[in-house]
Image (cartoon, rainbow, N blue to C red):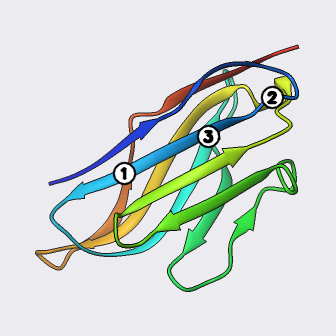
Amino acid sequence: QVQLVESGGGLVQAGGSLRLSCAASGRIFSINSMSWHRQAPGEQRELVAAIPTGGSTNYADSVKGRFTISRDNAKNTVDLQMNSLKPEDTAVYYCNANLRTTDWSTRSYWGQGTQVTVSS
């Protein structure tokens, strides 16, 4: 069993900041990559930022220069620092981890999602 638990969402005014956190726990052997995605009402889920193990980060063009993804491999956590927030950033944000469990299976897991609302 693997769980991803997100925290840190909320309501903020445009131009403000929020920090999302996600912690993975359970029968984890190793984590290949961790990422944040978001889904606005009526829209498809989209990748916001990703950070593979030992590799370079990548960001959606719409958040470059405003969002920063970071990861603590020892704690199996990934954070998303969101600055200069815009109303169009309003969405449910989901954490994802592609990992190998102790029974040697590899797959992606999703968190339950956390709402981010940016008011104008």
Residue 1 in the image, given as x and y percentages of width and height: 14, 54
Q: Residue at x 17, y 79 (%)?
A: 104
Q: CA distance from mark 3 to mark 2?
A: 11 Å
User: In the image, which disc is placed on residue 19?
Assistant: 3
Q: Quadrant of residue 84?
A: top right
The type of residue carrying mark 3 is: Arg
Tell me the SS state at disc 3: strand
Q: Is residue 52 left or right of residue 1?
A: right
Q: Nearer the viewer, residue 79 or 105?
A: 79
Q: Label 2 crowding class (10 Å Cα cut-off): few <14, some 14-19, many 20+?
A: some
User: In the image, which disc is placed on residue 10?
Assistant: none
Q: Residue at x 68, y 72 (%)?
A: 57
> Image height check: is 97 above or below 94?
below
Q: Is residue 8 left or right of residue 104?
A: right
The type of residue carrying mark 1 is: Ala
Quarter of the image where the C terminus is located: top right
Residue 41 in the image, given as x and y percentages of width and height: 66, 21
Residue 12 in the image, given as x and y percentages of width and height: 73, 19
Tell me the SS state at disc 2: loop
